[in-house]
């Protein structure tokens, strides 16, 4: 179950070729194949990757200027999705068109709006500033999951798993699991969106530096660590994290680690998910080898997550209706799921006034 009236990241901007390239980029979002390309003026265009004639993917056709010609029987569509040429027909049928999605690019993330186009609001785009900032350095990443996106949201909303899933990478101390996070709501940008997510703050003091930190800076003392992040609809994490020698003031000189991470989940289908991520470090704190080391650590850790969540999903599929046991550590993910369900129900009410009898959100 997913929201439609919101922005989903479909790609990093470097994945979309320039206008003079013959390549046509396609990726599936919410079970809809979407074609993305740039016009010669540089505008990003997103069209349904399904020709209105016999449903062939337009992405196996070809670019003709700012238009795309279907590779099956040759219908040609402009950047608005209108058919402007139908070989063998004197008149193009008025119904011949493909769906066009609102698209936005912000700090290297390419977003598509999968719901009603008139509701698309760029004020809802997340502040993924460190993806493209002169003050921060990162290497962009992408992973594909064969699990529902909500299970990955759950994972990102409960960092107690760092102590166990990431014991030898990001975690390094069981104290992370023992620390109780503070959870607050994040207001939305308008009356239509009174809440857009939740903020989770977790401080863990006097713990050994995790193996991840030791890879790019040597620490001989214990650290005070922090993780402060917003998790926003439909599935974006924006996080400040770091560590400094135990007892040191926040602005004290000396060795410390400061990171900013932007991660976002886009459902590909009911059981598959796109995961876009980066973890940035300040430009003045480490060179390219540090950037590379952080990226490699992240890939290693995210594979640990993926292995666990994939195995969890396999178990859930065996007995989908078997209840789980809610525990205190689930507070953030339960709040997020409630928020998602409220928005989902509101969307269903607009789309279909019939009363709802089924719970909206399940793994
Ligand atoms: S399927 Fe595209 S022109 Fe026939
Ligand atoms: Fe994790």
Image (cartoon, helix red, strand yellow):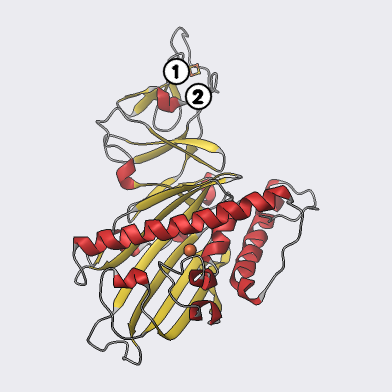
Residue drawn 54% across the image and 67% down it = 157
Q: Position of residue 88 (x, y in %)?
A: 45, 7
Mark 2 falls on what kind of element? loop
Asked if labels 1 and 2 touch by Cβ distance under 8 angstroms, the answer is: yes
* Upstream in sequence: badge 2 or badge 1: 2
Where residue 247 sits, quadrant-wise, is bottom left
175 or 356: which is nearer to us? 175
Q: Position of residue 228 (x, y in %)?
A: 44, 75
Mark 1 falls on what kind of element? loop
Q: Which residue is mark 1?
A: 75
Residue drawn 39% across the image and 57% down it = 300
In the displayed structure, does residue 294 sit left or right of residue 158?
left
Q: Which residue is mark 2?
A: 51
Q: Is residue 259 visible?
A: no
Where residue 191 sits, quadrant-wise, is bottom right
318 or 179: which is nearer to us? 318
Specify the label residue 254 is tagged with: none
Q: Position of residue 229 (x, y in %)?
A: 45, 71
Residue drawn 47% across the image and 36% down it = 34
Q: Is residue 312 visible?
A: yes
Q: Is mark 2 within 8 Å of ligand 1?
A: yes
Where residue 293 sits, quadrant-wise, is bottom left
Q: Residues within 10 Å of mark 2 (few under 14, many from 20)?
A: many
Locate the C terminus by quadrant.
Answer: bottom right
Residue drawn 54% across the image and 37% down it = 32
Q: Position of residue 241 (x, y in %)?
A: 38, 74
């Amino acid at each position: 179950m997913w929201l439609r009236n919101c922005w989903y990241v479909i790609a990093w901007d470097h994945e979309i070729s320039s206008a003079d390239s013959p390549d046509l980029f396609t990726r599936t979002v919410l079970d809809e194949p979407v074609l993305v390309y740039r016009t010669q003026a540089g505008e990003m265009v997103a069209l349904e990757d399904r020709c209105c004639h016999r449903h062939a993917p337009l992405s196996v056709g070809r670019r003709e200027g700012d238009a795309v010609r279907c590779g099956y029987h040759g219908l040609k569509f402009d950047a608005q999705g209108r058919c402007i040429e139908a070989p063998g027909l004197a008149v193009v049928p008025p119904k011949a068109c493909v769906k066009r999605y609102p698209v936005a690019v912000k700090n290297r993330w390419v977003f598509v709006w999968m719901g009603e186009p008139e509701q698309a609001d760029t004020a809802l785009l997340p502040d993924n500033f460190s993806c493209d900032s002169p003050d921060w350095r990162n290497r962009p990443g992408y992973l594909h999951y064969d699990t529902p996106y909500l299970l990955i949201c759950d994972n990102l909303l409960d960092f107690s798993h760092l102590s166990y899933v990431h014991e030898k990478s990001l975690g390094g101390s069981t104290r992370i699991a023992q620390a109780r996070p503070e959870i607050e709501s994040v207001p939305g940008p308008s009356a239509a969106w009174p809440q857009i997510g939740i903020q989770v703050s977790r401080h863990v003091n006097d713990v050994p530096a995790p193996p991840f930190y030791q890879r790019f800076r040597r620490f001989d003392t214990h650290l005070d660590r922090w993780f402060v992040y917003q998790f926003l609809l439909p599935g974006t994490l924006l996080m400040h994290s770091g560590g400094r020698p135990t007892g040191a003031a926040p602005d004290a000189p000396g060795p410390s680690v400061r990171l900013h991470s932007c991660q976002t989940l886009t459902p590909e289908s009911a059981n598959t998910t796109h995961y876009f991520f980066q973890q940035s470090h300040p430009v003045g704190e480490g060179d390219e080898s540090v950037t590379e080391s952080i990226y490699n650590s992240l890939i290693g850790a995210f594979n640990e997550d993926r292995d666990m969540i994939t195995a969890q999903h396999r178990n859930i599929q065996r007995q989908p209706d078997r209840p789980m046991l809610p525990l205190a550590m689930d507070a953030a993910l339960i709040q997020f799921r409630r928020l998602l369900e409220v928005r989902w129900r509101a969307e269903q009410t607009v789309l279909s006034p019939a009363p709802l009898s089924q719970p909206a959100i399940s793994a």
